[in-house]
Image: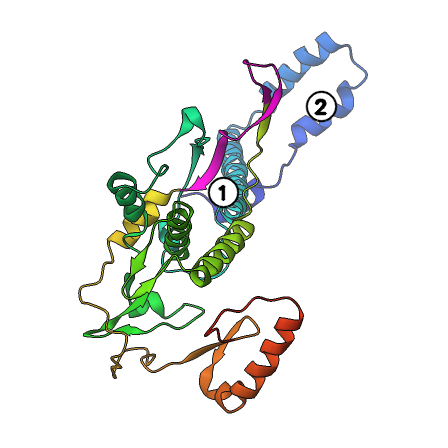
Amino acid sequence: MVDFRRFVYSLIPERRKSEESFDCESSLLPEKEEHHDKSISRLNNFPRDGTEIEDSRDSYLHFFIRFFHITLTLFFAFTTAMLYINIKTTNVLNPQITYSPATSAIKYTTRLFDSGLNYGKTIYQGPPAKKNNDAWTALFIHGLTRISAAEAAPMQNKTLPIPDDPENYITSLAVFHQLHCLNAIRMALWNATLIRGEEDETNMRHLDHCVDMIRQAIMCHSDISPFVWGRDPRDGKAKGISSVTHTCRDFEAIQKWAQDRPFKTGFNTSKVITGDPLGWADYHYVLDYGEITDWEKQEPDYKNWAEGKKQEMLKSGQIFYDGDNI
C-alpha cells in the first residue's frame, strides 16, 4: 500500500541531499568529470533499503497526475470553446426570436435562383392554366395547420381551438399566406379571377392588402444575397445577373412540418366551443395601433377612436375602399 504522506509529498518536486551536495561541489569541475563523478556519487549514495525505487515510483505517479490534469484541462477548454461557437453559429443561422411551433422544422440550404427570363422560366410562370395553377396551389395547400395545446401554449398571440377537435388549435404559417397573396396578384396580372368562397380575391381591396403583406415580408427577411453584373455576350453591355446562389430556409422541410399536422375536421368559423385546454375559445382580438390587444378592454372606446383614427389617416394620404374599417 502506498503511504499517503509519501503520495502527497511526491506532488511537490524535491531535490535529494545526494544531488544537492554533488551540485554544490561539481559547479567548478569540467563537464566530463562532472558527469563521471555524478555517476559515482549516485552509486555511492544509493540506499540499500529500496528507497530509490519507491522514489522512482512516486515520480512516475507524479508525472501521470500532472499529465492527466493537463489533458483534462485542455479537454474542458476545447469543449467550452466548441459549445460557444455552436451557440453563436445557431444564433446567426436561426435567429427566430419569437416562438413558432414550426421552429424545429427550420433547416438552411443554398439555392440558385432562376432568372424568370427567356432561358430561366419556371413552372410557376405564364398565363394561368391547369399546370401552373396546380403548381401554385401545391405551395400553400397546407396553409391551415392543426397544432396541439402544448405547441400552441408558448405562442405570443393566442389562437382558437378547432371545433369538434378542441384538444388542438388552428394556425397558419406566414409563408403560406404570403404565397397565397402572391398567387392572387399573379392571377390579377393575367386578368384571371381567383374565387374563394363567395369573395373574389382578385378585387382591388384584397390585392392592396396582399401587396403590402408581401412588402413587409420582404423587408422582414431582407435577403442580403449579392446580385452580380456581367457582360452580355450578344452586345457586350454590362447587365445585372439575378440567377445567383442564396442562403434559404428549406421550404420543403417547413411544408413537410405543416403536412404532418393537417385538419382532421372542417373549420366552422361560427361555432364557439368550451372546455379547450388553454381556455382560448372565446378570445377576441382587435388591431389597435399595429398591436394586438384584448377586445374586451377596447370595446367601450373603440368606435369613437376608430372614427377619429380614420380621419387622421385620410388626411395623411391613406386609401380606403367602400366598407373598410379601421
Distance between the alpha carbons at the discs numbered 2 and 1: 47 Å
Residue at 25% x, 52% y: name it.
Answer: 259
In the image, is residue 289 above or below residue 234?
Answer: below
Give the amino acid at mark 2.
Phe
Residue pointed to by mark 1: 79
Tell me where residue 240 appears, x and y as whole percent.
58, 28
Count neighbours of disc 2 (C-alpha within 10 A) and say few if under 14, some if 14 to 19, many if 20 or more.
some
Query: Considering the numbered disc 1 on the image, is that residue within a helix, a strand or a loop?
Result: helix
Q: Which residue lies furthest to the right in this view?
A: 28
Give the amino acid at mark 1.
Thr
**Residue 246 covered by magenta stretch:** yes
Residue pointed to by mark 2: 22
Query: Considering the numbered disc 2 on the image, is that residue within a helix, a strand or a loop?
Result: helix
Q: How many marks?
A: 2
Quick one: label 2 or label 1, which is nearer the N terminus? Answer: 2
**Residue 33 covered by magenta stretch:** no
Magenta stretch in the rendered image? 230-249
Residue at 33% x, 35% y: name it.
Answer: 123
Residue at 77% x, 25% y: name it.
Answer: 24
Count neighbours of disc 1 (C-alpha within 10 A) and say few if under 14, some if 14 to 19, many if 20 or more.
few
Q: Quadrant of the N terminus?
A: top left
Tell me where residue 118 appears, x and y as whole percent.
43, 26
Q: Is residue 112 left or right of residue 230?
A: left
Nearer-the-camera pick, 77 or 135: 135
